[in-house]
């Protein structure tokens, strides 16, 4: 872990998902530093050990990392991979649709093989390896720290949206960026009171050609890479960043307009 000057950088904080959707990487691109939030309770059937790709000849399928049985109270950092099965080749065989149709299949399947090749004991390490390899492929700096390595003792969390505020307070972080769809979880007055800048990121356009009649959204980054060059991926990652209070005002105006339109019918 490199020395960190928390004051002068923007931060993102998120759980280490398995090959997450492109918006996750847009956030990494727009932040200076990243905290891998691995010291929280693991949720069964979450994005931690699975994601979605296109299925041949239609629909979507799940790609899953097999994990060992664990208690409901297990932390993300404690989840172990079940390495006594042929799960790696099984996952690669699920890429049949891309093998037939996608222009970047050979490049991306090699990336995928590199991500899953090491026999990691813990899921968090495999997921971080995936983030590192894909960021390197896309030429995106990825400077991260595991939350569990920070040895913070945070107990006064009021809600799921309060975790980021408490982490920022403890580390004296002054700018935090979050995906816009989670805006409702945050009490902006609490951030204002702590003099911490809260911002929301919203991608401009996440649609691209998949050789399908209708677009399948929010698939794994693997799907994006199969169909797009590095330059095209960066175009898809273009985003707007809003100050929190401004964004919430815009959302309220949008809701008001929708209500007026509905009531006029």
Image: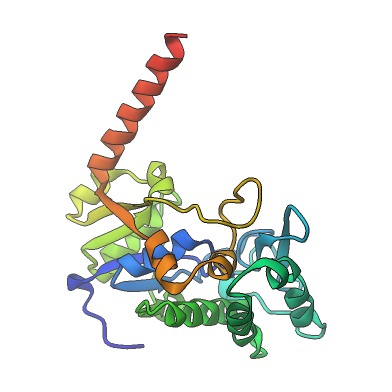
Viewed as shown, does residue 190 lie left or right of 203? Answer: left
Q: Position of residue 108 (x, y in %)?
A: 59, 78
* Quadrant assignment, res 27: bottom left
> Residue extending furthest right?
85
Viewed as shown, does residue 192 lie left or right of 96? Answer: left
Q: Position of residue 169 (x, y in %)?
A: 26, 63
Depth order, front residue of 191/119: 119
> Residue extending furthest top?
264
> Residue extending furthest bottom?
118
Coloration of the structure image: rainbow
Q: Quadrant of the N terminus?
A: bottom left
Can the viewer see residue 17 in this picture? yes
Depth order, front residue of 7/259: 259
Measuring 41% from the left and 22% from the top, which residue is drawn there? 258
Depth order, front residue of 126/97: 97
Depth order, front residue of 196/26: 26
Relative height, residue 88 to residue 159 (above, below): below
Can the viewer see residue 121 in this picture? no
Q: Position of residue 261 (x, y in %)?
A: 41, 16
Q: How many marks?
A: 0
Viewed as shown, does residue 61 lie left or right of 241? Answer: right
Measuring 64% from the left and 56% from the top, which residue is drawn there? 211
Relative height, residue 137 to residue 213 (above, below): below
Measuring 44% from the left and 10% from the top, which residue is drawn there? 263
* Quadrant assignment, res 117: bottom right
Measuring 81% from the left and 83% from the top, which residue is drawn there? 86
* Quadrant assignment, res 145: bottom left
């Amino acid at each position: 872990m490199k020395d960190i000057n928390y004051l002068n950088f923007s931060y993102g904080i998120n759980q280490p998902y398995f090959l997450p959707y492109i918006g996750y990487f847009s956030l990494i691109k727009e932040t200076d530093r990243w905290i891998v939030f691995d010291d929280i309770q693991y949720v069964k059937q979450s994005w931690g050990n699975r994601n979605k790709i296109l299925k041949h000849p239609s629909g979507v399928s799940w790609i899953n990392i097999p994990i060992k049985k664990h208690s409901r109270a297990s932390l993300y950092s404690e989840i172990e991979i079940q390495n006594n099965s042929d799960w790696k080749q099984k996952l690669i065989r699920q890429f049949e649709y891309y093998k037939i149709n996608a222009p970047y299949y050979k490049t991306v399947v090699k990336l995928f093989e590199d991500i899953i090749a090491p026999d990691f004991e813990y899921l968090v390490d495999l997921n971080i390896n995936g983030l590192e390899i894909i960021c390197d492929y896309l030429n995106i700096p990825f400077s991260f720290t595991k939350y569990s390595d920070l040895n913070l003792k945070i107990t006064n969390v009021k809600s799921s949206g309060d975790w980021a505020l408490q982490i920022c307070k403890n580390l004296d972080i002054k700018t935090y960026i979050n995906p816009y769809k989670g805006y409702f979880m945050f009490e902006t007055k609490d951030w204002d009171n702590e003099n911490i800048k809260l911002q929301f990121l919203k991608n401009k356009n996440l649609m691209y050609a998949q050789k399908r009649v209708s677009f399948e959204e929010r698939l794994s980054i693997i799907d994006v890479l199969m169909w797009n060059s590095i330059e095209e991926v960066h175009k898809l990652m273009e985003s707007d960043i809003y100050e929190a209070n401004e964004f919430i005002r815009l959302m309220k105006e949008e809701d008001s307009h929708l209500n007026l339109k509905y009531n006029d019918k």
